[in-house]
């Protein structure tokens, strides 16, 4: 079968296309080979992407060595860390669809034969995987790797979350401003995705478990030479995929999606996976139900533990064997016949890995806990679902009942927390922060970190129709659906209402009579939209609810 690129490069009718390529130095020999697009989210804004220029050069070497011609283009990528805690966070989740759309447009406009996706961070990774699933071409995902951890501070290697926790400690008088500045200087010693198991590293691990990255590549640190070796090998691999006509939807299947959820459960990955995996499944035309997260969490022991659930970081995880040893340990629970970018099955790829059974990775027989990952809750406060992360919650807080302290925005809540207005025993409710209401479903990262720094993480619960950073710990529940902007029950909560959170029983209830809620519903009016122009306005009109992955539908039902 004629390659896609040859349809627009054959002489004489397509000599004009050849001329455009030749103007940039491509030769006739180059244009006879598979044309491989490289979607590169490199920038000097995002630490996790800072090294992607170098990674891209290694990928190109591999493509050329395998007989292909690399063609690189840029993709946007915003940094969650820099956007945290202010207006910029509302723009982060919407970038996911812009990334997927822009890659689709570039690949289809130029009829590449295959695609290499270069990214490392939060919404960029799922956006790229969504594009690959939508395009259904030979594709491989390559990440830039995590940064190294900083010096030991408060019992663990420092990372960028140490700063916001430090602000809370400064507020309490436990550290000085000079100590905070020293922490600022040392907590992020290299480029790379942040060294904890936040959304960035969770999604890179998920890409590997899904079969879209080379085995063992997800957690190679950004500054290790193996990172460039893996990039070069990935370049060779994508050409092999083109030659064998292995496309993304042969790799991203129901079985590989299930493997990704299993892996996320086994390592206690970010709650944001509950937004991104359904979105990837949608693009691959795979039916997905949120209950799969809860079902797999109940049946998948937590066998790897990292910050924010433990003092170890992802570099420790890498040195313990990373994703392959976890998949090998849960081999009996995964679909070992799922195809991967190597052309082999996931079972073949992990055959020679052994679990070290150390402080980072345990065994199925002796796990950190018998249940792992995420929990999906339902109840009168969350009729369509809510999501939490038991692995990051103090066991004594898994059941919690208290009076509501209601805020109509993240900013209001943060101000109240810093002013010591939130008291032990309360349930902080932050609403109108969902996909439509935020708009953009911002993370309540700062609120949870402030509570942690003030010593309230195990004394206060926080529930929201927004979401959380993968780095958060404490008692939190997000993704409440329907969201407040759509008139969900969270919009009807008043200060003092009792809220009953029972994670073991998967319940989240507002202890107000149905009759009272019905009356409140009649009196409720949606607030004026926060944004009335620009892309956020468009997003607020198009985005689906959190329980559907906050997707933007792009095909008929």
Image: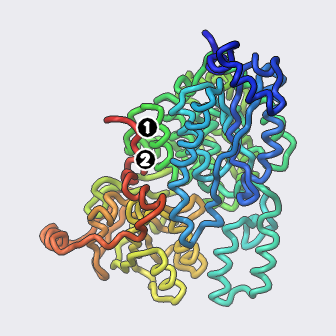
Residue in the picture at 84% in, 30% down: 25
At label 1, counting other C-alpha atoms closer than 10 Å, the crowd grade (few under 14, some 14-19, many 20 or more) is many
Q: Which residue is mark 2?
A: 551
Q: Position of residue 330 (x, y in %)?
A: 58, 35
Q: Is residue 178 above or below residue 6?
A: below
> Can the viewer see residue 319?
no
**Residues tagged 2 and 1 counted as in contact (Cβ below 8 A):** yes
Q: Position of residue 493 (x, y in %)?
A: 28, 74
Q: Nearer the viewer, residue 21 or 343?
A: 21
Q: Is residue 326 left or right of residue 90?
A: right
> Can the viewer see residue 472?
yes
> Outermost residue toward the top?
1
Label ID, residue 282? 1
Q: How many marks?
A: 2
- Considering the numbered disc 1 on the image, is that residue within a helix, a strand or a loop? helix
Q: Position of residue 23 (x, y in %)?
A: 80, 31
Q: Position of residue 239 (x, y in %)?
A: 72, 22
């Amino acid at each position: 079968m004629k390659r896609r690129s040859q349809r627009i490069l054959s002489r004489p009718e397509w000599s004009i296309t050849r001329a455009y390529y030749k103007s940039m130095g491509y030769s006739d020999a180059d244009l006879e080979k598979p044309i491989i697009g490289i979607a590169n989210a490199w920038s000097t804004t995002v630490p996790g992407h800072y090294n992607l220029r170098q990674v891209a050069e290694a990928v190109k070497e591999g493509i050329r060595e395998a007989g292909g011609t690399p063609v690189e283009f840029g993709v946007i990528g915003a940094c969650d860390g820099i956007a945290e805690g202010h207006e910029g966070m509302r723009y982060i989740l919407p970038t996911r669809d812009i990334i997927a759309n822009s890659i689709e447009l570039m690949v289809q406009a130029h009829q590449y034969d295959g695609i290499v996706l270069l990214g490392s961070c939060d919404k960029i990774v799922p956006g790229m995987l969504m594009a690959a699933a939508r395009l259904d071409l030979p594709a491989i995902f390559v990440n830039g790797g995590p940064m190294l951890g900083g010096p030991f501070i408060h019992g663990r290697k420092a990372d960028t979350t140490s700063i916001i926790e430090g602000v809370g400690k400064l507020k309490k008088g436990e550290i000085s401003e000079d100590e905070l500045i020293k922490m600022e200087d040392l907590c992020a010693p290299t480029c790379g995705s942040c060294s904890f198991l936040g959304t960035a590293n969770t999604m890179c691990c998920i890409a590997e478990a899904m079969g879209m990255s080379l085995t063992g590549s997800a957690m190679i640190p950004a500054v290790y030479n193996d990172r460039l070796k893996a990039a070069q090998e990935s370049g060779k691999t994508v050409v092999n995929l083109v030659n064998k006509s292995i496309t993304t939807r042969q790799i991203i299947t129901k079985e590989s999606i299930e493997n990704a959820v299993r892996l996320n459960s086994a390592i206690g990955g970010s709650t944001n996976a509950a937004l991104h995996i359904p979105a990837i499944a949608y693009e691959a035309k795979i039916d997905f139900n949120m209950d799969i997260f809860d079902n797999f969490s109940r049946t998948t022991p937590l066998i790897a533990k990292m910050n924010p659930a433990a003092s170890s970081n992802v570099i420790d995880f890498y040195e313990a064997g990373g994703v392959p040893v976890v998949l090998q340990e849960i081999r009996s629970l995964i679909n070992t016949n799922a195809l991967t970018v190597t052309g082999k099955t996931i079972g073949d790829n992990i055959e020679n890995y052994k679990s070290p059974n150390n402080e980072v990775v345990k065994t199925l027989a002796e796990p950190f806990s018998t249940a792992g990952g995420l929990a999906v809750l339902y109840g009168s406060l969350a009729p369509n679902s809510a999501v939490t992360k038991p692995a990051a919650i103090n066991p004594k807080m898994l059941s919690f009942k208290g009076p509501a302290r209601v805020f109509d925005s993240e900013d209001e809540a943060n101000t109240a927390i810093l002013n010591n207005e939130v008291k032990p025993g309360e349930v902080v409710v932050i609403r109108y922060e969902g996909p439509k209401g935020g708009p953009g479903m911002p993370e309540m990262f700062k609120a949870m970190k402030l509570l942690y720094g003030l010593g309230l993480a195990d004394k206060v619960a926080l529930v929201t129709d927004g979401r959380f950073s993968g780095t958060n710990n404490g008692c939190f529940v997000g993704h409440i659906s329907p969201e407040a902007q759509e008139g969900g029950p969270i919009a009807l909560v008043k200060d003092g209402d009792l809220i009953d959170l029972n994670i073991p029983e998967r319940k989240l209830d507002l202890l107000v009579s149905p009759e009272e809620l019905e009356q409140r519903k009649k009196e409720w009016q949606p607030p004026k939209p926060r944004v009335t122009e620009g892309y956020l306005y468009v997003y607020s009109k198009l985005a689906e609810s959190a329980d559907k992955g906050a997707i933007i539908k792009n095909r008929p039902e």
